[in-house]
Every structure is written in C-alpha cells, then in structure tokens.
C-alpha cells in the first residue's frame, strides 16, 4: 500500500501519494481503480524521480469538483493540481481512463509535459473492444450496472484485468472496493463514462497535436482494449513509439510492475538523452500545496 495524505484543492479533499525526488512523474488511474493500483509500480519509478499518484476528484477517496467529467475537463483538473503542487513540468503516465485526459493535457498544455506514457486505454471509437466494454458503452446498461450491481463490475474487473496466476493484495483489494462501492463515486463514474463516450470521436484532433515524446505501452493480452487501439494511437500521435508487454494483461502495472517500470525508465532516460525541450509558453503561477 502507498502511504497517502488528504490535501485540500479547490476546497475539496484530494488523496495523494508521494515518493522519491527529482523530475516529477504523475500517475493517472482509471476505474474501478484508485491510486493504490500503482502500489507496486510507483516505488520502482521513484528510484530517481519524484512520483505523485492521486485519486481523481470524484473517484477513490477524493471529493468531486464542480463541473463535468470529460477528458478535457479532467485535463484542466490535472493542470490545477500541478499548479498547486508547483510542478512546472511532469512525465505523465495514464492507464485505462487515465489515458485520455493525459493525451488531452499533452495537447493543450505542451509546456507542462516532459513525456507521455499511455497504457491500455480506450482511445478509438472504431477499434473493437471486449464484449463487456461494448455493452457497458451502451449508456443505459452502463448506468444500470454501475448504480445497482457494483459488486458484479468489481468482480469482473478482478477476473479480467489480471492473469489467472496473479491477485491483488487483500489490503489493496479492500481499498479499491471500499472506494468503488460508494454511491457518490459510482455516480461520478456514470457521468465520466458518458462524457468520455461523447468526446471520444473528437479526441483524435488532440492526439495529432501531441508534440512530446510518447510511449504507447500496451499489454499483449489486453482483453478490453486490444492492440488495435495501440496501433491506431501510434498513427495519430506524431512522436509515438509502441512497446508491447509480452503476456501482459490490463493491470500489467500490478502483475508485471518490474517489466512495466523498466520500459518506462528506459523511455524517460531516452527523453533525457535526447535533450527534448517542451514548447515554451507562459506557465500560470503556482500556489502552495494545501494540506488537509
């Protein structure tokens, strides 16, 4: 388990975990996850970096902020958090539904991004998904299941996100379930799924504007978002490279954290060696982080 603290941002509590020192690496989760899905990955990345993981406002143990839940609005929330933490530039790592706001953020705020890593995310409105995701994307079914059958969704995630030989640690499983079973969290996810689905066909216009070095790190056995999503994203992002994690599944950050960390670290090192400099534009003044 990652050690966490509640901080106050936009007058709402946000749960945050911090490890290490150096350039910032910000980890962005999806659902039914929270920051603890990175419990094995974050310490490995923190060997020579400052790693920050947080529960998105409205998910995990963070209160929702006013407004909607589209990838664009969540990218704006991320910008506010980076301002509060006085992080001028960061390496972004987004998995699942953390991938879309990471891509939009990189397009909208290029001066704030050192590099971008996207893992196992719904990035194409045309590429095939698993039958579960196909049904969940039908908004009425998604809303019904999320609001009335959370245990079924959570159980199905555990059994399709991990290989049969792997399992979540009991403490992490309990932390994820206690957060996901909250009605307010599931109501937020319903709105988020609707916002993502509405914006998904328009996301390629942001993909094509991403100028930072980008690693598309995909699981070979990604059930829900197969490799077609990764190859599509590679055609859209100008500086993208694709790496496939052999035998990886959706939660490869849980089941294969060492391999995932090694790929990300090599990528970050290549970015440093290349001397890539993000575009220079005015950065909003950063305010101090406010402990809860």
Image (spheres, rainbow, N blue to C red):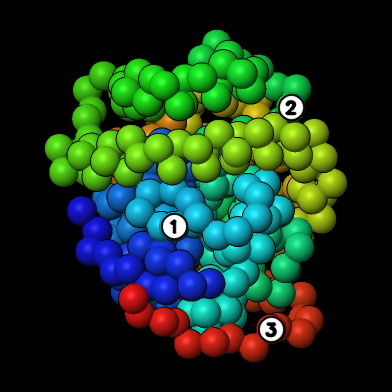
Q: What is the C-alpha distance between the residues marked 1 and 2?
A: 29 Å
Residue 287 in sight from this viewpoint: yes
> Are the residues at dot 1 and dot 2 in contact (C-beta closer than 8 Å)?
no
State the residue position of label 2.
125
Residue 275 lies left or right of residue 255; in this view the side is right
How far from the left and from the top, in percent, is residue 143?
55, 24
Which mark is in front, 2 or 3? 3
Q: What is the C-alpha distance between the residues marked 1 and 3?
A: 24 Å
Which mark is in front, 1 or 3? 1
The residue shown at (84%, 46%) is 205
The residue shown at (59%, 72%) is 80
Quarter of the image for residue 19 reads bottom left
The residue shown at (32%, 43%) is 179
The residue shown at (47%, 31%) is 219
Assess disc 1: are there few (<14), some (14-19) or many (≥20) residues with their C-alpha within 10 Å of its C-alpha.
Answer: many
State the residue position of label 3.
284
Looking at the picture, does residue 88 appear above or below residue 224? below
Q: Earlier along the polypeptide chain: callout 2 or callout 3?
A: 2
Q: Nearer the viewer, residue 119 or 7?
A: 7
- Quadrant of the image containing the C terminus: bottom left
Residue 129 in sight from this viewpoint: no
Q: Secondary structure at mark 2?
A: loop
Q: What is the C-alpha distance between the residues marked 2 and 3?
A: 33 Å
Q: Earlier along the polypeptide chain: callout 1 or callout 2?
A: 1
Report the label total: 3
Looking at the picture, does residue 68 appear above or below residue 152? below
Assess disc 2: are there few (<14), some (14-19) or many (≥20) residues with their C-alpha within 10 Å of its C-alpha.
Answer: some
Residue pushed farthest left? 170
């Amino acid at each position: 388990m990652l050690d966490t603290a509640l901080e106050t941002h936009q007058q709402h509590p946000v749960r945050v975990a911090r490890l290490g020192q150096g350039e910032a690496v910000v980890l962005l989760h999806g659902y039914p996850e929270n920051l603890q899905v990175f419990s094995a990955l974050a310490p490995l990345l923190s060997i020579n970096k400052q790693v920050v993981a947080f529960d998105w406002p409205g998910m995990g143990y963070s209160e929702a902020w006013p407004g909607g839940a589209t990838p664009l609005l969540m990218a704006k929330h991320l910008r506010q958090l980076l301002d509060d933490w006085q992080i001028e530039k960061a390496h972004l790592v987004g998995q699942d539904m953390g991938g879309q706001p990471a891509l939009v953020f990189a397009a909208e705020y290029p001066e704030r991004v050192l590099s971008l890593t996207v893992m196992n995310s719904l990035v194409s409105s045309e590429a095939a998904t698993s039958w579960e995701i196909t049904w969940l994307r039908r908004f009425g079914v998604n809303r019904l299941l999320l609001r009335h059958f959370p245990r079924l969704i959570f159980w199905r995630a555990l059994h399709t996100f991990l290989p049969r030989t792997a399992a979540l640690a009991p403490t992490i499983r309990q932390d994820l379930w206690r957060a996901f079973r909250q009605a307010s969290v599931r109501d937020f996810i319903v709105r988020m799924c609707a916002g993502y689905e509405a914006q998904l066909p328009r996301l390629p216009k942001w993909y094509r504007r991403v100028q930072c070095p980008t690693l598309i790190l995909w699981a070979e056995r990604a059930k829900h978002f197969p490799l077609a999503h990764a190859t599509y994203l590679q055609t859209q992002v100008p500086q993208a490279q694709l790496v496939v994690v052999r035998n990886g599944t959706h939660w490869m950050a849980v089941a294969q954290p060492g391999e995932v960390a090694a790929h990300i670290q090599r990528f970050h090192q290549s970015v440093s060696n290349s001397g890539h400099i993000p575009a220079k534009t005015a950065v909003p003044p950063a305010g101090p982080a406010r402990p809860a």
